[in-house]
Amino acid sequence: MTPGAIAASISAVVVGRRATPRTAVAAGAALMAASGLFIAATLPTHGEFLGYWLPIGLVLGAGMGMVTTGTSTAAALSVPPHSFAAGTGLNQTARQVGGALGVATLATILRSGASGQAATFAHVYVFVSLLALAAGFVGLGLVLRPAEAASDAAAAPVAAAPAR
């Protein structure tokens, strides 16, 4: 798991400087979905860390870093400065609730299959890949509202033209 976390950190820094939140979320979700579908289709029966899990973990981690950066940036930029804490807090809360629901769903999927069967784990990877694809499509619709500019324009009094 550590290589994936390192890849997430690196991709978050790189993508945060070079991509829009929409692009970061869509591209990261696409990487995660493609990786998950690849795992579902090629799940090995023996542990193959260096040749299989390490490279896939790096790609999945990079995708997660991109999605996290994109959603965090969108949350921060879509609220006025006085609501920054509320916007980022809501983003973190949604992430925690989604994680809890995801773990519960994955446990249910695993419980419904035969213990230790690769096919059961493949179902998990298909499920999370479909969710990643859905997140990517939602990410394509991200709209950053220039909240500060809009509220400043609405609050600013219209200045009268100077008399000549």
Image (cartoon, grey):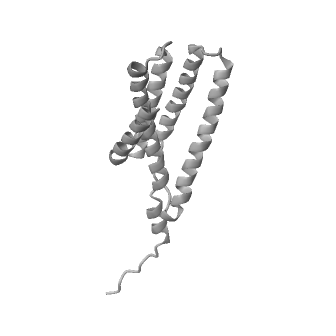
**What residue appears at the point 50 percent right and 58 percent down from the top-left corner?**
79
How many marks the image carries: the answer is: 0
Q: Does 157 appear above or below 164?
A: above
Residue at the image point whose x is 59% and y is 45% from the top: 94
Residue 98, image x, y percentages: 60, 39
Q: Quadrant of the C terminus?
A: bottom left
Q: Is residue 135 left or right of residue 12?
A: right
- In the figure, residue 120 lies in which quadrant? top right
Q: Residue at x 48, y 63 (%)?
A: 81
Could you say which quadrant of the image residue 34 lies in? top left
Residue 138 seen in the current view: yes
The extreme bottom residue here reads: 164
Identify the residue at horizontal 53%, vertical 23% (top origin). 125
Image position, residue 41 (x, y; %): 48, 15
- Against 82, is 127 above or below? above
Q: Is residue 40 above or below residue 65?
A: above
| Residue 19 at least partly seen | no
Q: Nearer the viewer, residue 68 or 57?
A: 57
Instruction: Report x, y in % for residue 52.
Output: 41, 20
Residue 36 located left or right of residue 23? right
Residue 146 x %, y %: 44, 58
Q: Is residue 54 left or right of residue 87?
A: left
Residue 2 occupies quadrant: top left
